[in-house]
Image (cartoon, rainbow, N blue to C red):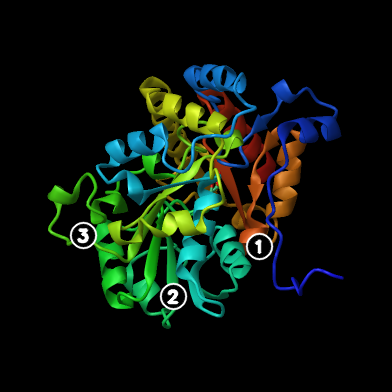
Amino acid sequence: MQPRDLSTHVPYEAGRGIEEVARELGMDPGDLVKLASNENPFGPPDAAVDAIQRAAANASSYPKAAHTDLTDALADRHGVDPAQVWLANGGDGALDYLARAALEPGDAVLVPDPGFAYYEMSARFHHGTVNRYDLSRPEFTQDGDVVCSQYDGERVVYLTSPHNPTGSVFSLEDVVEIADRTGEETLVVVDEAYAEYADVQSGVSLLGGDGAADHAFAERDDVAVLRTFSKAFGLAGVRLGYAVVPGAWADAYARVNTPFAASELACRAGLAALDADDHVAKSVETARWAREHMRDELDAPVWESQGNFVLVDVSDARGPESADAVASELQERGVIVRDCTSFGLPGCIRVTCGTEAGTERAVDAINEVLAA
Ligand code: PMP
């Protein structure tokens, strides 16, 4: 017996851990600056670490079923009903639940190009087919026309706001326009993994949540919003994310979720992180500073970003296919960035916003490598 034909399934390319890179370079991990996976450079909030340690003592018990204190806290935070919050093993897990709930075998989805790889993987796991919309280059502008002119009846359309790897956003007006033009048989997933760093109104306000009173748009049952604890809350290793879904979708969760969709340790950490306002504020403020600092100081074009990273065009300095070489040369200098070749951008690197010191070190190293 062999696995089914998985030849169209492209494995997810996760960034390498800092320990592994340090071993390869013969360096101390503390001497490396890892800016490759859009992680929080300040680590997890202390309160979340304490909460995990406390919960560990009870790790022999199963977690509570789907409806947890965390679901209630998130519902409160967003001003929605707890049944609209679908907890999951990271944002990735939430994408799986949405695909499972939305797709019949053979349904098509529409994903951004360049874009986050897991939309496509998740759709394929759920027997969907994949079409792509090209983001409008060279600015990677995201708007209703860019998406709708390439829409062809797909069942799910993925919007990333802020977008990975470009940092550009969709306005709420764009989201509404896309949802209107794609019709009520299409689910528009607004991936807001980086929302905390951005100045754009959340799609949650289209689901009856906070901010609904600030605009005249109607509540929708064809939009879902994705959020994660991996970025501003500093909990990427814990694997905790969620979708906020329309009220009409609430019942589907119990039918599609993996039993105990998020671990008790993760939920406790998440609850603690929701109260760690200072940690989140410091993370967001520093990222906002860092992305502007990189735009000002790097000797290469840098796209304007609303995320905790910037996309840097190294092609003028080093050639159109140079991202791989630039990333390797930076790694030799102890600075780890993302080579964007796998995003289809072989002349670009993506650099996560670090601490002040980490960002300054990255800027110096990048400028040195660009001048080589
Ligand atoms: N969406 C986007 C755009 C991302 O970049 C990521 C992580 N890199 C995710 C979703 C998922 O993150 P996680 O599974 O860690 O919550």
Q: What is the spatial separation of the Cα atoms under label 2 and label 1, in whole angstroms?
A: 35 Å
Question: Residue 285 at what x, y percent from top left?
Answer: 39, 29
Q: Residues within 10 Å of mark 2 (few under 14, many from 20)?
A: many
Question: Residue 193 at what x, y percent from top left?
Answer: 45, 47
Q: Nearer the viewer, mark 1 or mark 3?
A: 3
Residue 210, quarter of picture: top left
Q: Residues within 10 Å of mark 3 (few under 14, many from 20)?
A: some
Residue 17 is left or right of residue 234, and the answer is: right
Residue marked by disc 1? 320
Identify the amino acid type marked 3: Glu
Identify the amino acid type marked 2: Arg
Label 1 beta carbon within 8 A of ligand 1: no
Q: Quadrant of the N terminus?
A: bottom right
Question: Residue 74 at what x, y percent from top left?
Answer: 35, 38
Of residue 332 and residue 368, the one placed in the foreground of this image is 332
Asked if 21 appears above or below 343 in the picture, the reply is above
Asked if 6 appears above or below 277 in the picture, the reply is below
Question: Residue 255 at what x, y percent from top left?
Answer: 48, 59
Residue marked by disc 3? 219
